[in-house]
Structure formats: structure tokens, C-alpha cells
Amino acid sequence: MNFAIASAMPAMPRKLPMPRKALRSPEALAAAARRRRRLEAWLPWLVIGGMFLIWEAAVRIFAIQPFILPAPSAIAASMVKWWQPLLTNSWATLLTTVIGFAMAIVFGLLLGVVIGSSVLVYRGLYPLLIAFNSVPKVAVVPILVIWFGAGFWPAVLTAFLISFFPIVVNVATGIATVEPELRDVLRALGASPTDIIRKVGLPRAMPYFFASLKVAITVAFVGSIISETVAANEGIGHLMLVASSRFDVPLVFAGLIITGVMGVAMYWVAVTIEERTTGWATRGQQDPRLAAGG
């Protein structure tokens, strides 16, 4: 009888153990967050340092000749030896790149707004833009030299031409993706097309715009150096061309590393401005795993 009563009684639910993360105090979570931020800050430097150490070890172990692949120590010695020409030519490349990039921002933003706001303009201009972007910019440099002469302006215009297209495409995409229902509501409330673009389209396009800047600033350096290797009297491209003609490969690699450093610096500037102006678009997504539910 007692057995039957006991079997008829419902089983008491077991208490599940609390997850370990739920038992952590706020102080422990804050300390873990600080450690993670420190790791994220140091991680790029650790990766770069590890890459140079592996590079140095590989050159020494396999006895690679300097005119094929110089060791980082040889590149550093070349930087110290030729620091003044490197500094002068780096400044020339940075100046032409920044001017061309600024021109691309202004014209790319204006044209992107026009293309994203009008279907007729999009249908008319987009094939022309795609065709022009498909032309190798190294083939355009001789024409620019004929028009403007060798030196400063061909490098500026090559940087402009090569970084112009990503800005136009991203800004036009951001404005064109405004929902038709939202446009209809705003028109019903009395908003003009200009008001819709200014108050809804441009804010919507800002994340796209800054994404394009991070792409365009890196390719702008490519444009400047291409022009400097074809027709210029100064710049990193010209310096690398002269160094390669003398088989001074460490100096060539020094120019490559300095170009990479300038590109990273300009990219960091774009990211900093993006975080200050469009942080509302990426809040809660600082950890990329959050998008996947991790």
C-alpha cells in the first residue's frame, strides 16, 4: 500500500546547478572585461612581433640571400641608414594620398547621394562608373602625365580615381535601402524629398560611408605609389623603383613597411571617426561573436 502511494506521488523536480558564469560577481566580470580589453589592445602587436620573429628565423635558418628576401634586421638597418630619404618620400606619398582621398570623399559622397536618390540617375550613370572602374589605373597614369605633367598631380588623381568608386557605391546603397514604407509615411507627414534624404537617407548611409572609407584609404595608397613608379621625382614608389634598380632589396622592403604603417594609421583615423559619429549603428556589436549568439 505504501509502495503504491509512493509511486503515485509526483517526483520532486531536481534543482539544476547554477551556471558558473551566473555565480560570478560583478567585480569578477569587470576584471575579466578589463583583461579582455588589454588582450585586444596587445594582440595586434603580439601578432606583428611574432611574424617578424618567424621571418627573421626563417631567413637565418634557410640562409636566404638579402637580394631575395632580406631579414627584418637588415630592413631595420636600411631604415636607419636611409632615414632621411625615407622620411622625405614618405611625406610626399602621404600628402598626395590624403589630397586624392579627400577629393574622393567629397565627390564620392555627392555623387553617391545623387545616384541613391534617383532611379533614373542610377540607371544612367552606374554602367559608366562600372566601366570606368574596370579600367586598370596604371593604364590611366600615362594619360594623366600628358595632361598634367610628371610629378604631383598624376599621383593625386590616381589616388582619387582608385578610391572614388567604393565611396560612391556604398553611399548610394545606404540611401537606396531606405524602406519605401518609411518614405511614404514621411511624404504623408509633409516631408519633401530633400528632407527625406537629409534626415533619414544620410544617417542611414553613414555606416556604409565609413565602411567604404576603410576600403578606399588603403587602395588610395596603391594609386599614389602606382603613379610614383611610372612618372614621379619623389615618393615611396619612386624611391622603391630607384632602390630596385640598384638591387637594394632591404630599402625596397623598408618602403613597403612604411607604406603599410601609413595605411594602418589612416585606417585607424577612419575607425576612430566612425566610432565617434556612428556608434549608434554598432552598439552591442563590439564583440563580433554576439552576432552569432556567442
Image: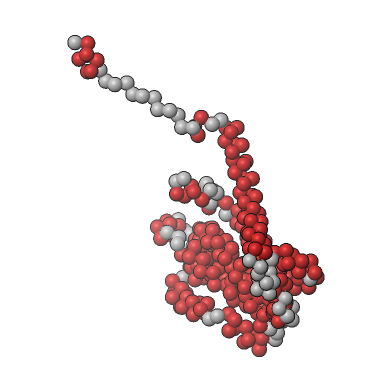
Residue drawn at (66%, 56%) of the image: 49
Across and down, in percent, residue 125 comes to 48, 77
Nearest the eye: 195 or 269: 269
Nearest the eye: 129 or 179: 129
Residue drawn at (57%, 36%) of the image: 29
Residue 118 located left or right of residue 230: left
Whether residue 272 is visible here, answered yes or no, is no
Nearest the eye: 238 or 251: 251
Residue 213 located left or right of residue 291: right
Across and down, in percent, residue 252 comes to 69, 73
Residue drawn at (65%, 69%) of the image: 64
Task: Place residue 232 in its image quadrant.
Answer: bottom right
Residue 214 located left or right of residue 56: left
Look at the image and name its color scheme: secondary structure
Task: Place residue 262 in its image quadrant.
Answer: bottom right
In the orientation shown, which residue stands out farthest toward the top?
Answer: 1
Whether residue 50 is visible here, answered yes or no, is yes
Across and down, in percent, residue 83 comes to 79, 68
Which quarter of the figure is the N terminus placed in? top left
* 179 in relation to 153, above or below: above
* 71 in relation to 34, above or below: below
Residue drawn at (64%, 45%) of the image: 38
Nearest the eye: 221 or 79: 79
